[in-house]
Amino acid sequence: VYIYRHFPSKQLLFIIFSCLMFSVWLFLRKFRLEAGAHMAGLLFSIIYIILPFFIMNVNQNVYGGAYNYQHPLLVFILVWTSDTCAYIAGKLLGRRPLFPEISPGKTIEGFMGGTLLSAGVGALLSLWFKFLTPLDGIILGILVGWVGTLGVPFESWLKSKAGAKKRSGT
């Protein structure tokens, strides 16, 4: 409680705690300490679910208590664009798998198509979102394309290392 009250940034403390819990979970899984691993996994799952809502609360605090819907909406639009365009480009042009052993359905062509089109939509969205410059939109679109596409194989890799089942669709 003392650390929480006197820490300069509550958000940074939360992120550090989340990383620590994830590290504990990986450590316990590696050494097959099942009870501790289940406890750490449960705590990490709770943090994983709460984190997006926490970030939205931070968004509200940045604007002095007024919630700005445009930032999360921008991210949602870019994620939807990246996922949809990666799927379409992968189905139409996909030949080479991105990670054949981890996620065989993902292709390099789908990854590139989703990332490029997400960057283009990010630039176009700068016309509507006044806080966003075209260059910022392109950079954010590329970042969302990379994180969105590479996040699922990374999650599958983590699950395979932990011995957990793969989630549906990956």
Image (cartoon, rainbow, N blue to C red):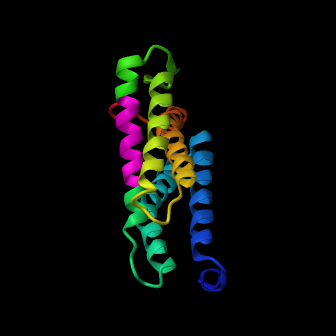
Magenta segment: does it hold 42? no
Q: Residue at x 49, y 35 (%)?
A: 116
Residue 37 pos. (x, y %): 52, 49
Residue 23 pos. (x, y %): 62, 52
- The residue at the far front in this view is 127
Q: Is residue 52 left or right of residue 62?
A: left
Q: Please determine whether, in this image, residue 25 is positioned above or below residue 149.
A: below
**Front residue of 76 and 44:** 76
Q: Is residue 70 left or right of residue 22?
A: left
**Front residue of 11 and 66:** 66
Q: Residue at x 42, y 57 (%)?
A: 127
Magenta segment: does it hold 83? yes
Dominant secondary structure (helix, strand or loop) of the stretch shown in magenta: helix
- The residue at the far top in this view is 95
Residue 160 pos. (x, y %): 50, 32
Q: Which residues are magenta?
A: 75-87
Q: Quadrant of the N terminus?
A: bottom right
Residue 100 seen from this side = no
Residue 67 seen from this side = yes
Residue 164 pos. (x, y %): 44, 36
Give the quadrant of residue 91.
top left
Q: Quadrant of the C terminus?
A: top left
Q: Residue at x 50, y 46 (%)?
A: 141
